[in-house]
Image: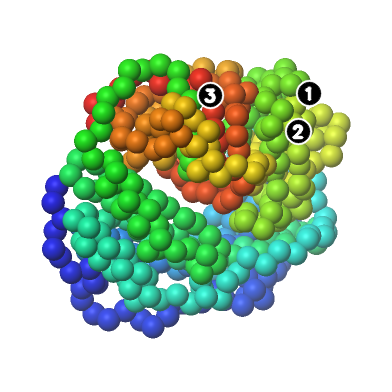
Amino acid sequence: MSAKKTKSRPAGKRFAASEPQLRPERELRGIIHHVLRIAKAGGVAETEVHVEEVIDALTRFANNTIHQNVAEHGVTVSIRTVLDGRTARVTTNRVEEDALRAAVENCLSLAASQPKDAYLLPMPGKQSYLKVNRFSPATAKISAEERARAVKRACDWAEKNGQVAAGIFSSGQAQSVAGNSRGLVAAYRQTQAEFSVTMQQGAAASWAKANAGDVGRIDPIGLAKTASEKVARAQDPIELVPGRYTVILEPAAVLDLLGFLFYDFSATAVDDKRSCLSGRVGKQLLGKNITITDDVYHPEQMGAVFDGEGLPRRRVTLVDQGVIKDLVYSRHSAKKARTTPTGHGFALPNDYGEAPMNLVVAGGNSSIGEMIASTERGLLVTRLWYIRDVDPYEKLMTGMTRDGLFLVEQGKVGRAVRNFRFNQSILEMLRNVELLSPAHRASGEESFEMVVPAMKVSHFQMSEVTKF
């Protein structure tokens, strides 16, 4: 495909100078207090209310042209009631008096049709939370025009190099407030921005992406240049035979695989024998250079500091130098295991229990350049996609490379390579890690967001060459 000489600017009317802003927190607290009063008047034993406000805006581009700009602003109210040992949850996006009253009535009606839950715990009382600041005024105020100007620079770079750019630039802000009839009140707000670009030149494509709470930490033109340089190198790929290779996985590729591990650290999943860690807690399962924590307080993480029931999230060491050290617990699974909840439970009722949502993989001191220089023969992998479970207990995954696969020979990056399908156990991979880069926030194909390093891994199984 040849680059289309089209103008990279938004069509139609001029965009507003700034995006809408979140309501004052007191308004969301007021909604909670009002719901609690309605429920109390109706004789409800216990009530829990979550109010979430989200503002999202997205600028989408393809063929070096912005073709879509969308924005949404909404408030949702989620209500859980407990009456006579039965519980249910109802959600509405209306906050008028009649809508909230109807939601409470519907919740009670739904709860009445549920069986009694002998394991249902009383709602937690007041909690204390560590403070985090993840709200960037610059991100909250960025306008559609500002996003469009950044996209134009990326598209101009693509046109200059005979390439075609496509992708998105999004920005948004959100706040959530939770409260219950036992006096618990928790509040959190954040901003978030993301830029993703795919460059195409001929039959080759490459990609780069970044996500951050502060839009100032995202460099759209830098990402465009990275994707542009890779796609220029990716022309006329050679075909290699399938087999075991030393691979250098860029952070996005590491994220694409390790994101599938998060639910395995759930105490409920381990107890139900649905985790690859069932029967393996306390054992040396991974390499000694692998340490994984769940840490919502890490400076590059995002997300609320409380869980679905309002408990504060704890920092948990899940893997310590390759040993499966601990799991995360909801209140229910903690009581069953006779331990302390870690603040990782989902909003009730649910069938999943809990999961760590803020994984941090400890890094090392090697740069990707040093990994390449130390490799006699291997592959440099940009990212992975279409990943599926083959053997859940051994965490054997299959998927494909994409958007930049390159041969490394004698310490240098060489020709592009046709994409492979892989069949690789994540557990085996984490026993074969030779080098780690410093860890940073990364975004990948599967929309996971974690703090991970790049990894040099030996004996990675490439099972067949793909057709594209």
Q: Tag 2 or tag 1, which sits nearer the N-term? A: 1
Which disc, if any, is residue 320? 2
Q: Work out whether residue 54 can be spotted.
A: no
Seen from the viewer's position, the closer of residues 95 and 29 is 29
Seen from the viewer's position, the closer of residues 105 and 268 is 268
Residue with the mark numbered 3: 458
- Tell me whether the residue at label 3 lies in contact with that at label 2, contact meaning CB atoms closer than 8 angstroms: no
Residue with the mark numbered 1: 282
Q: Is residue 258 left or right of residue 281?
A: left
Q: Tag 1 or tag 3, which sits nearer the N-term? A: 1
Provide the secondary structure element on which disc 2 rests.
strand
Provide the secondary structure element on which disc 1 rests.
loop
Provide the secondary structure element on which disc 3 rests.
strand
Q: Quadrant of residue 163?
A: bottom left
Residue 241 lies, with reference to residue 401, above or below; the image says above
Q: Quadrant of residue 329?
A: top right
- Residue 55, given in percent of the width and then of the height, sits at 48, 67
Please give the name of the residue rendered at 53% of the width and 60% of the height, measured from the top-left corner. Answer: 212
Please give the name of the residue rendered at 27% of the width and 47% of the height, measured from the top-left corner. Answer: 232
